[in-house]
Image (cartoon, rainbow, N blue to C red):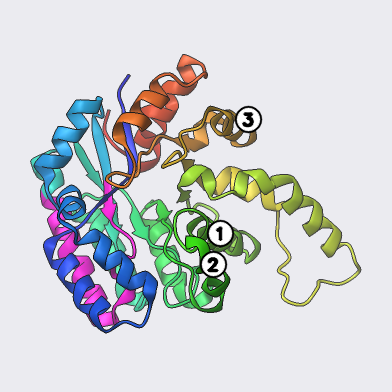
Amino acid sequence: MHMIATEEAFATPEYLEALGKFASTSTSDNVRYAAYFQTKPEAARGLCDVETRLANMDANGVDMHLMSLTSPGVQLFDADLGTSLAKQTNDYLAGLIRQYPTRIAGLAAIAPQDPVRAADEVKRAMTELGMHGIIINSHTNGEYLDERKFDPILEAAQRCQAPVYIHPTFPSGDMCKPMMPYGLSGAIWGFAAETGLHATRMVFGGVFDRFPELQVVLGHMGESLPFWLFRFDNIYKMMMSQGQVPPGMVKLERKPSEYIKSNIHITTSGMFWDQVLKFAIEALGADRVMFAIDYPYESSEIGAEWIRNAPISAEEKEMIMSGNAQRLFKIKP
């Protein structure tokens, strides 16, 4: 079966240089760690060198990578530098797509620090560069997409039919403090907790009532959201039936779970586990699940072998391995 991997990181040397400079004066242990890890020769080669990427794909039978700028992305920087790096990175990725149209597709980076210019970049990426959606590395300086200041970005994404992939980053501020011991702030727990919070804020903040056609993608089997569908609905109904809307709550037009089933898609990145895959299909439907590896941070060999042998039907496997990505991201078969 055709195999499209949908959360595959890349970087440019210019981005890694900017990240290194930023980290050199940063007080954040997480930022310094990210810069140290990503600029190591092996990681940098996996992120930046297209021939290394293609060889890895060929060795593991992966037909296409949907590439996106690695976390933490351009959201660390001031608005001008972030916007400039996003444009530069998107131009580079568009060139790769033109060079390898059957092997590479792309998600455009944007700098939400300046929502108006970010919305303009969504339009440029989708109408001029041939991108297939946008990547946002979760919070921007502790702010989330449910906040009204970011509506221009969501409006542009909806109008341009650009799926928004919300990729993890390190938690911000006070949220990160209790996670720092034991290495919990990163991929082992903090990434999922922070990104799941972001998506949950969008659901309960009424984002999908304001933008009903907006489509969001979450990696790592949905950053735990599929497992909370019952509790989301049950507790929300309980709170809203108390006679008046509790402080801070938004009255939604539908049940919370319905937005997750109609406006959110999930990928398998770094979660190569049969039981969770079967649960996600049962909870959301096979048409909301897409294959992803999380290259170069996860093993392509393990991920590709797992999905080929997953205990699901051939029809479900075809949808997850390629059909859903082709439909959502408008990738030609």
Q: Position of residue 200 (x, y in %)?
A: 60, 59
Question: What amino acid type is highlighted by mark number 2?
Answer: Met
Residue 49, numbered label:
none
Label 3 with label 1: CB-CB less than 8 Å: no
**Where does label 1 land, which residue?**
193
> Within the magenta stretch, is there residue 69?
yes
Left or right, residue 206 beside residue 274: right
- Residue 330 occupies quadrant: top left
Secondary element under disc 3, as helix, strand or loop, is helix
Q: Earlier in the sequence, mark 3 or mark 1?
A: 1
The region drawn magenta spans: 67-95
Secondary element under disc 1, as helix, strand or loop, is helix
The residue sitting at 38% across, 74% down in the picture is 29
Q: What's the CA distance linking mark 2 and mark 3?
A: 32 Å
**Where does label 3 land, which residue?**
282
Label 2 with label 1: CB-CB less than 8 Å: yes
Q: Position of residue 36 (x, y in %)?
A: 25, 66
| Main SS category, magenta section | helix
Question: What amino acid type is highlighted by mark number 3?
Answer: Glu
**Where does label 2 land, which residue?**
179
